[in-house]
Amino acid sequence: MNGQRIVLLLASGVWVLGLAGARVEAATAGAEPNRPARAPAAARLTREGLRQAVDKAKKNDRSDISKMVESLGDSQKWAVSDDLVSDFTSFLKHEDAQVQLLGAHGLLVLRKPESKNALVDYLVARDFGKLRERIQSGQLDRKQAQWQVYASLLAIRTLGKVGDKSVVPLLKSLRGQEALQVEWGGREAEEALAELGEVETLSDVSPQDDEHKRWAAADAIRKIRDPKKTPDLIATVRNKRVAREVRATSAEALSEIGAENASDVLFAVVDDPNEPNDLRKPIAVYIGKMKAPGVEQRLLTYAENRQSLVRAHAIVGLVFQRPEKYLDLWFTKIMDVNEPVAFRETLAGIEWYMPPDTLKDRKSDLYRCLDATYPDGRPADRLRVQMWELIHDLFRVEPHIVLSSASSDGAMRLKGLIRSILLRQRQPGGEAFEKIVNERFDSIVTIQVNQSQVGK
């Protein structure tokens, strides 16, 4: 949470709250010279310390409570004992929302089943649908509202960790709640349902539902790792009434679980031309993570079929099967001028499925791809820039690159990447910024002269 902003999105606008980035320093006594100091022992959070922080907050001195809120989840800073559950629970009823936030944070750290009822009561009492109205009428201060929202999100997370399925109806009611949409989260209800293994509840999302709802469910369901949920995940993959995104990440969860009995189900989707291509393609990758008999050969059949729409993804799936063999194939196909350019660009563009360390070990091969060409020998600009971006992401370097034109699609994409890099470095904007972009581009790029144009 260090340095993060809480942004609450309501129809009235965007609110920003900067949380204090405070540290809790502890001295190390008796450290011997010339020896590295031991990490300071975590400070024990006491009932008296909590009460003092709350009392100071009442007097508008929020320094102590801000430090606690900021660092309470850091076990190296605070040792939180179980006997503080009742204190944190009582804070949820306090009139000051920052004290409520401290209570919710403490209960998340402890994750005790006995806190469930208090957390449920807290969430039910918030009445998020009327939050904007209460602020506009002056009943609730904006900063207090922000703290309440954050406390509510922590309360939702805790309910997922506690493991009591009686809270499922409440969590379902909080899905998509506008008042809980924040910059750093807003999908806590879905995440909590995933913690509880609620595959059936999460998969109740149709292709017609809005994009946020589809992806909130999809991102949550992909994190399920309980082998007991394999039948539910298989049923979700098979169900054509479920949103494509959710079916795809259910397949991903199956591959991470290692559910070998699910490989035939996943292949059935990949084999079906009536299924959406943007479902078949990722599943071809996920299957590669499964070690079931016959998986490698079936993926190889797709990889060797130049007419297959899932060919590139099958090759990436094969990399998971046997990286020492099929990563060579990946590089070879990217550089093969006899392959369609669109296929080569697709292959380069789905590298993000692969573990970064797998690619980092092949640095020289990555640099070799900066020389990718068309059959006539011209630089394949878009493909080269794709590999330039990958090298930058992996090694944080900006390698030299040769392009065919300063105005090609690839060159324009590279300039966009340079802009993004410079913005992250907080370079000045305006005309000065564009000058810096062009200078950086010129220092990285060499334009290859087309010999057929020389002398004309």
Image (spheres, rainbow, N blue to C red):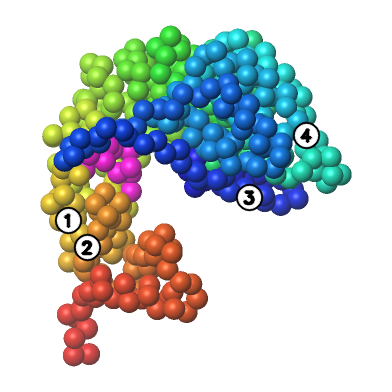
Q: Which residue is mark 1?
A: 367
* 451 sits to left or right of 129: left
- Name which of mark 4 and mark 3 comes first in the sequence: 3
Mark 3, residue position: 16
Q: Which stretch appears magenta?
A: 349-359
Task: Give the foreground label among 4 and 3.
Answer: 3
Local secondary structure at mark 3: strand
Secondary structure under the numbered disc 2 in the rendered image: loop
Along the polypeptide, which appears first: circle 4 or circle 1? 4
Task: Residue 408: give x, y in percent of width and height.
Answer: 35, 70
In the picture, measured across the screen, residue 325 lies left or right of residue 182, that is: left
Spatial separation of the CA atoms under disc 1 and disc 2: 8 Å
Q: Secondary structure at mark 1?
A: helix
Magenta residue check for 21? no
The three-letter code of the residue at mark 3 reads: Val
**355 inside magenta stretch:** yes
- Whether residue 172 is visible here, answered yes or no, is no
